[in-house]
Amino acid sequence: METGENLREKVPDWITPELVEDTIRTWQSHYTQLLSSQDAIGILLRVGGLFDVLRESDEQQAVSGVGPGVEP
């Protein structure tokens, strides 16, 4: 695994070395090949991107008034 210093240069601040290790531990059983720190970072970035899309969608619905209990 890369050092924490190398990791900090390449990824957003919210991805910590501990989160990378936790991600590898969590996902390793779902893969036949050994996951690297770069694999874990890729997983985290994709999940982070999904949350960004969901948050943006939620914010757009709040602005437009679309949602449960709101009639068009």
Image: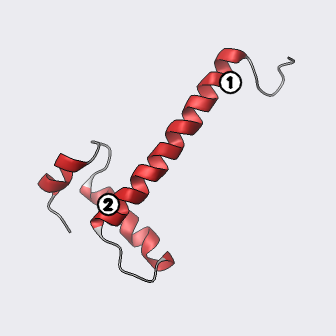
Q: Mark 1 packing: few (<14 Cα in 10 Å), some, or many (20+)? A: few
Residue 20 drawn at (x, y percent)? 32, 60
Which label sits on residue 5? none
Q: Amino acid at mark 1?
A: Gln
Whether residue 12 sits left or right of residue 48 in the image: it is left
Report the residue at 56% width, 30% height from top.
56
Which residue in the rendered view is the most extreme toward the bottom? 32
Is 10 located above or below residue 17 in the figure? Answer: above
Q: Tell me residue 14's x, y (percent).
A: 32, 44
Judged left or right of residue 42, residue 64 is: right
Report the residue at 42% width, 59% height from top. 43
Please give the residue where the numbered disc 1 appears in the rendered image: 61
Residue that carries the numbered disc 2 in the rendered image: 20
Count of picture labels: 2
The residue mark sitting in front, 1 or 2, is 1
As shown in the figure, which amino acid type bears the numbered disc 2? Answer: Val
Label 2: state its secondary structure. helix
In this image, 61 relative to 46: left or right? right
Q: Is residue 41 above or below residue 31?
A: above
Query: Separation of disc 1 and disc 2 at Cα?
Result: 33 Å
Instruction: Say if 14 sits above or below 69 in the image.
Output: below
Q: Position of residue 32 (x, y in %)?
A: 45, 83
User: In this view, which residue lies farthest toward the right?
Assistant: 71
Q: Residue at x 68, y 24 (%)?
A: 61
Q: Quadrant of residue 57?
A: top right
On the image, the x and y values in percent for residue 28 come to 42, 75
Q: Earlier in the sequence, mark 1 or mark 2?
A: 2
Quarter of the figure that contains the N terminus: bottom left
Helix, strand or loop at mark 1: helix
Q: In what quadrant of the picture does the C terminus appear?
A: top right
